[in-house]
Image (cartoon, rainbow, N blue to C red):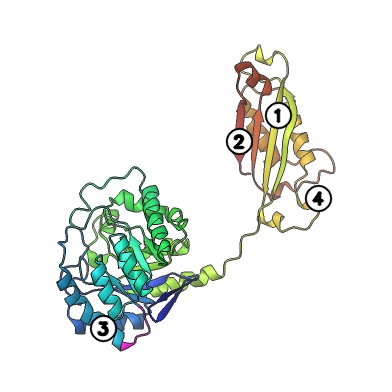
Amino acid sequence: MELACGGHSLAFGDRPLVMGVLNVTPDSFSDGGLFNRPDKALEHARRMAAEGADLIDIGAESTRPGAEPVSLEDELARLLPVIEGIAALDLGVPLSVDTAKPEAADRALIAGAGMVNDVSGASEAMLEVAARHGAPVIAMHMRGEPRTMQKEPRYDDVVAEIHDYLAERVAAGRDLGVDVLVDPGIGFGKTLEHNLDLLANLRELRRIGAPLVLGTSRKSFLDRLLGGVPVEERLSGTLAVNAWAAALGTADVLRVHDVGPHRQLAESIGALRARRRSSAPRRRVLARGIACRSRIGVTAAERAKPQELVVDIDVTLTAQAARARDRLGETVDYAELAAIAQAVADRNEYRLVETLAESIAATVGRERPKAAGGSTPWNRIESLRVRVTKPGAAREIGAAEVGAEIDWRP
């Protein structure tokens, strides 16, 4: 997948892209005041480009917890000289403007930015600005605003709620012809537990179908997670979290302060992901509706005579077996599965139907049939599911079905 970003193109592949953070603010939580002079900002942009940044994100309004808003005039006074200066350097790196103001985004895109990064979630007005310029937008989730976002944030299901919110923003962008990237907003109106839930379940957000941007760099949740780590010592924690997301393929863009180490991380993980073998298709062999009889039940009356049972066995073969040739000896013989189910049921030694189901599973998964000439390669079973139902018992209580089901891994 490729995205047009100003006069540049962003290509997504095996490795995540590295977005370097350039804050031209006096009060950002990590680097406030370091690059708020244009000459310092341009020098840092050169350094990030040399270290391998795929794009540079320039922000002029702090979004740290408790930050006060900045006027449009002040934001533009900080932003425009830096964006124009970096664009003139022609570093070969696209620029993103980090702003929640449509007016600021409009001016920044004219000045040389090619993307908008909106922590407020990309309003309709912001999407309209992006549409006029043909620019992609990062829509980030934030509960509240920077001044108030960390005051007892609550969610019923943080992953589901943020998924639905970001999916709606992607759909709104699509209606206007705007490519929308999504950012779950780690640290923006979330507790430590909310952040961990999101990071552990990024696959759910990938289902939106939009590139995912992850911003964990030096954030305070790492301080709480690691038991007291100051901002300047959070690189290791940041690398660990971003490596997790990159290795799982759940982050397309890593927004970071430390470009060099993250470019090395991205290249290393990208090389490993490129070498992975494609997953072999899994084969399943089914033997369902096997008629059996067994003296089974909790009471003596139930066990007085054999009951009718129906057994279903689903076998998933290993990848090796799935790649095997078209021969009976390389698969599972469903006739043998039926014979095992009937033989185990005939032992008449069970009180609980789930015990019978588990015994059938164990016999299939661990024991070769004792009959001579058995063809099934039992060591090629990856997993299996056994289901035993009691039609007579279901009829007695007016139920559609009663029984037990066992998932088994040999």
Mark 2 surroundings: few (<14), some (14-19) or many (≥20) residues within 10 A: some
> Mark 1 sits on what residue?
310
Q: Nearer the viewer, mark 1 or mark 3?
A: 3
Front of the two marks 3 and 4: 3
Q: Are marks 1 and 3 in contact (CB under 8 Å)?
A: no
Up/down of 11 relative to 315, above or below: below
Q: Residue furthest top?
A: 301
Say the numbered circle drawn on residue 328. 4
Question: Where residue 56 is drawn, which disc sits there?
Answer: none
What kind of residue is marked 4?
Leu
- Residue plotted at (28% across, 64% down): 218
Q: Is residue 37 visible?
A: yes
Query: To which quarter of the image does residue 63 belong?
Result: bottom left
Q: Quadrant of residue 333?
A: top right
Q: Which residue is mark 3?
A: 84
Based on the picture, tell me whether residue 91 belongs to the magenta stretch. Answer: yes
Amino acid type, mark 1 = Val
- Residue 12 percent location from the top left of the image: 47, 71
Q: Is residue 122 visible?
A: no
Q: Residue furthest bottom?
A: 89
Question: Badge 2 is on which residue?
Answer: 406
Pick whichever of labels 4 and 2 is earlier in the sequence: 4
Magenta span contains residue 381: no
**Percent position of residue 4, x then y:** 42, 75
